[in-house]
Amino acid sequence: MQITVSTLIPAPLAEVWRAYTTPEDIMAWNAASSDWHTTAATVDLRPGGRFSSRMEAKDGSFGFDFAGQYTRVEPHRLIEYDFGDRHARVEFEEGAAGVTVRVTFDPETVHPVEEQREGWQAILNNFARHVGAKS
């Protein structure tokens, strides 16, 4: 079973791609709620390259690293990566109304599937707001 979340962003494909893959932008949008933030991000966007985002509660009570390795990169179209024993696929599809970003990922076994879907969708919604604010 996999989980898919998506959003439509009314912005040029090159801008959407850049915001999704640039550490400074990732630090601005990569949080599921306003009481969390990303304090550091690294991106080596190529097959075999690694990525990492340090996600922390703003009150300092908890934090973790979301890290993995890119397995496939097709600029402006597709990013696939492994994180731990899980896999994710990010698709960028340009259309008349903007760019649809679709993220499909393997769920983990600790939290309920719906909670994971909501969290990843919230992050993607933050991404869409971030790109929209820059357009």
Image (cartoon, rainbow, N blue to C red):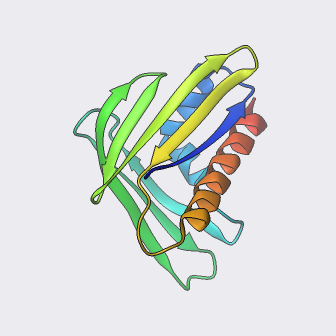
User: What is the tally of numbered marks visible in this picture?
Assistant: 0
Eyeballing the image, is 59 above or below 128? below
Q: Nearer the viewer, residue 23 or 55?
A: 55
Q: Give percent across and percent down for residue 84.
A: 29, 60
Eyeballing the image, is 135 above or below 29? above
Q: Residue furthest left?
A: 48
Q: Nearer the viewer, residue 48 or 135?
A: 48
Q: Does residue 31 appear in the picture of this structure?
A: no
Q: Residue at x 59, y 34 (%)?
A: 101
Q: Residue at x 56, y 36 (%)?
A: 102
Q: Residue at x 70, y 32 (%)?
A: 8
Q: Residue at x 43, y 52 (%)?
A: 1
Image check: 14 left or right of 43? Answer: right
Image check: 26 left or right of 65? Answer: right
Q: Give percent across and percent down for residue 100.
A: 64, 29
Q: Quadrant of the C terminus?
A: top right
Q: Quadrant of residue 92?
A: top right
Eyeballing the image, is 39 above or below 10? below
Q: Give percent across and percent down for residue 133.
A: 77, 38
Q: Residue furthest front?
A: 1
Q: Residue furthest bottom?
A: 61
Q: Give percent across and percent down for residue 81.
A: 34, 43
Q: Does residue 117 appear in the picture of this structure?
A: yes
